[in-house]
Amino acid sequence: MVGAYLAERFSPRIFVPTAVAIAGAASGGALSGSRLFSDAVFALLLLAQFRSWDDLADRGRDAVSHPERVLVRATSNAPIVAFSGVLAILNICLAIRRDTSGIAVAVLVALIGALGAWYSRRIGRTVAGDHLLLSKYPAMVIIVAGDRVLNAPVQILCAALVVHFAACLYEGWHDPASPLSIGGQR
């Protein structure tokens, strides 16, 4: 089931360039091929974790608006819950290993907590709620950057804001139900 889910909901055409963009934003202007590759792989793992978590949280809504999706049709969501949990543990371990300052793991754990709290209390979509959900992308920039934030705070934080702005534009463009879209719900 995980393979079918990933094939349907984790298109390399969208997520590989997104991971590379996050890695580039996290570079602080110090790009190297090996670092960009390593950072993009980490970003891809973060994207997979939070994409699966988003889809688990939206399963009920998707049953109405997207009944054909693999996760909606599945008799059990346990494989995706396990997949998401394994990714969370792996990403926390990678954050600890990659960044001895603790910045990456602190931001990752805060993001997990904030989104978990939001998902458990969310009733409908709002502009503020969509911004909170989209805040995972600039947070990923900080997580991937880790202690580089200490050496290039202005560059990395500005890049993270650009990533957030791009995520908001994309959300408003591709999801007409988003409160961020031109014709979206208000």
Image (cartoon, rainbow, N blue to C red):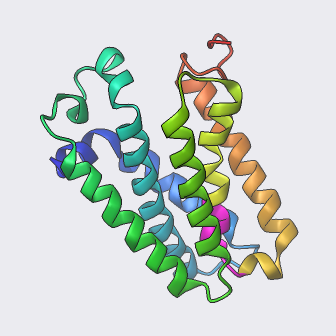
Question: Which is nearer the eye, 48 or 83?
Answer: 83
Q: Residue at x 38, y 22 (%)?
A: 61
Q: Residue at x 62, y 81 (%)?
A: 32
Q: Quadrant of the C terminus?
A: top right
Residue 76 located left or right of residue 61: left
Q: Is residue 20 above or below residue 100?
A: above
State the image coordinates of residue 62 (x, y, percent, origin top left): 34, 24
Q: Which residues are magenta?
A: 140-147
Q: Quadrant of residue 23?
A: bottom right
Q: Is residue 143 magenta?
A: yes
* Prevailing secondary structure class for the magenta stretch in the rendered image: helix
State the image coordinates of residue 143 (x, y, percent, origin top left): 61, 68
Q: Quadrant of residue 155?
A: bottom right
Extreme residue in the right direction: 154
Residue 134 located left or right of residue 54: right
Q: Is residue 23 visible?
A: no
Q: Is residue 185 magenta?
A: no
Q: Is residue 153 visible?
A: yes
Residue 158 located left or right of residue 33: right
Q: Residue at x 76, y 75 (%)?
A: 149
Q: Residue at x 28, y 51 (%)?
A: 81
